Amino acid sequence: MPAQRTYRSASAQDQSRNLGGRRLLSAIVLLILLVLWSGEAPVCAALPPAAPPFTPLPPDTITIPIDSLATVIRPKREKPRFLQGAAIGGDLLGLGLKVLGSDWRQLEAFFRLNLFDEYYPIFELGIGEADREGLEIENRFHIRAPYFRLGCDYNFANKKHSGNRVLGGIRYGFSSYNYDYSAPGLVTDPVWQTAQPCAEKDLSGHLHWIEFVVGVETKLWRFVRLGWDIRGKMRIQQKAPDEGEPWFFPGFGKNTEGLVWGGSFKLVFDI
């Protein structure tokens, strides 16, 4: 029996082709899934390097929020100049005692430097004089001699550049003097019981002393200042004539035992 041939219609052929295309597409998808499963990643653009791990700050480090920097950061202060200026002045207290006719008085002027508005090296120069007449025995004493002091003050005020100062310091003082002394009826003759006058002239000596000074000073107007201080004075070495010590030491004060107290009322001019 002769073989029979089977012929498909056109629609059957189209269906066969579509089935073949689907199989091809499924194979491609399966291949892509196998590639991805095997770890092969597609090529892509390079990523930026990862940020380094966080490093903790030392315990003594102070952190400041960025929004607070405007109030915390201030312009750096400039250091004050070494030499802020100088000043000259005088003691008004001694001038007042002279006008009032006191037994003793001192005319004094000084020159002072200003370092950093803190330290004030000072040189004081003056003339001390005294004229005294004792009412009991009519003895008379007269002295007139120069003296000087050298020292330094420190400004203890909190606001050192405000113009007002709280000063404390020390001075070394020296005076070399000659004085006259007379006593018309001081010595009595033991035999004749008559009074013998005593008169000595140009008796010489010198005195070294130190002073501890505490005072205040304020600015009156531009370069004019006014101040006062209290001083405790103590002798450190002296040479007196055999006839005796003077009643008054120029620059030091009256001849008394122990600590001698004094003071000054100063008018100061900045230069």
Image (spheres, rainbow, N blue to C red):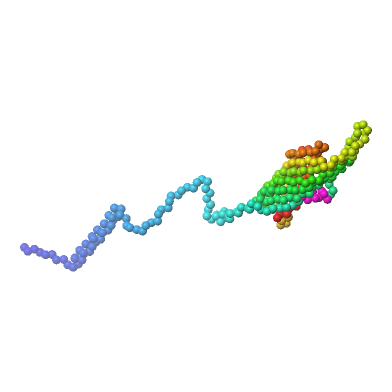
- Residue 266, percent from left and from top: 75, 50
Q: Is 171 within the magenta?
A: no
Q: Is residue 180 left or right of residue 27?
A: right
Residue at image location 66% in from the left, 53% down from the top? 84
What stretch of residues is rendered in magenta?
A: 91-99
**Front residue of this view, candidates 269 and 108:** 108
Per the picture, the main secondary structure of the magenta-coloured stretch is helix
Q: Is 92 within the magenta?
A: yes
- Residue 6, percent from left and from top: 13, 64
Visible residue check, residue 124: yes
Residue at image location 90% in from the left, 37% down from the top? 196
**Front residue of this view, candidates 187 and 123:** 187
Q: Picture quarter containing residue 195?
A: top right
Which residue is the extreme one toward the top?
191
Residue at image location 18% in from the left, 68% down from the top? 10
- Residue 255, percent from left and from top: 80, 40
Q: Is residue 111 above or below residue 195?
A: below
